[in-house]
Amino acid sequence: MQVKVNSQDKAYAGDPQMPLMWFLRDELGLTGTKFGCGAGLCGACTVHVDGKAVRSCVTPMSAVSGHAVTTIEGLSSDGNHPVQKAWRAENVPQCGYCQPGQIMQAAALIAEKKGKPSEQEIYSTMSGNICRCGCYQRIFAAVKLAAQGA
């Protein structure tokens, strides 16, 4: 099967039920996508498939065949996507483990809402991403800031 990862065509000939996360991390070396719970509940593994946020730990390779996958490494070539810039401006990361998934979730929300998510949409969308350090107030502020600049 063929999949486009960060704008590059990639071939995969393994088990079609293997989670996308392991293909990204183990076969492509894209380790920004983190393993958290393995059940799609924490959001650490969030990537985009055709622009939509998905949990890569529960997304089988068969579901992404012929689709475009974007990881944190492919979100911006220089790390200056509006969400990444807002993350730095709001000093969001503490331990940093959840940040790639948080950023990918926020970027998908802002793109979907064309830069105008409501506060309730930010809360409800981001609530599925767990931050072990409890940086939720800074995360919320950064998403709002990024949406203003999108």
Image (tube, rainbow, N blue to C red):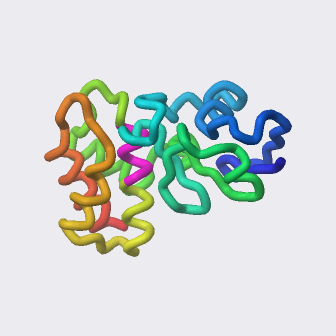
Number of numbered labels in the structure image: 0
**Quadrant including the C terminus:** bottom left
> From where the camera sits, is residue 130 visible?
yes
**Residue 81 % position (x, y):** 44, 53
Q: Quadrant of the rendered structure where residue 115 is?
A: bottom left
Which quadrant of the view contains residue 67? bottom right
Does the magenta segment cover residue 102?
A: yes
Residue for point 38% across, 63% down = 109
In this view of the protein, which residue sits in the foreground, 40 or 68?
A: 40
Judge left or right: residue 10 versus residue 109: right
Residue 36, above or below 120: above
Name the residue rendered at 36%, 38% in the picture. Answer: 42
Rendered position, 45 above or below 124? above
* Residue at screen point 67% across, 56% down: 68
- Residue 50: % across, % down: 61, 62
Image position, residue 92 (x, y; %): 24, 39
Q: Which residues are magenta?
A: 99-105
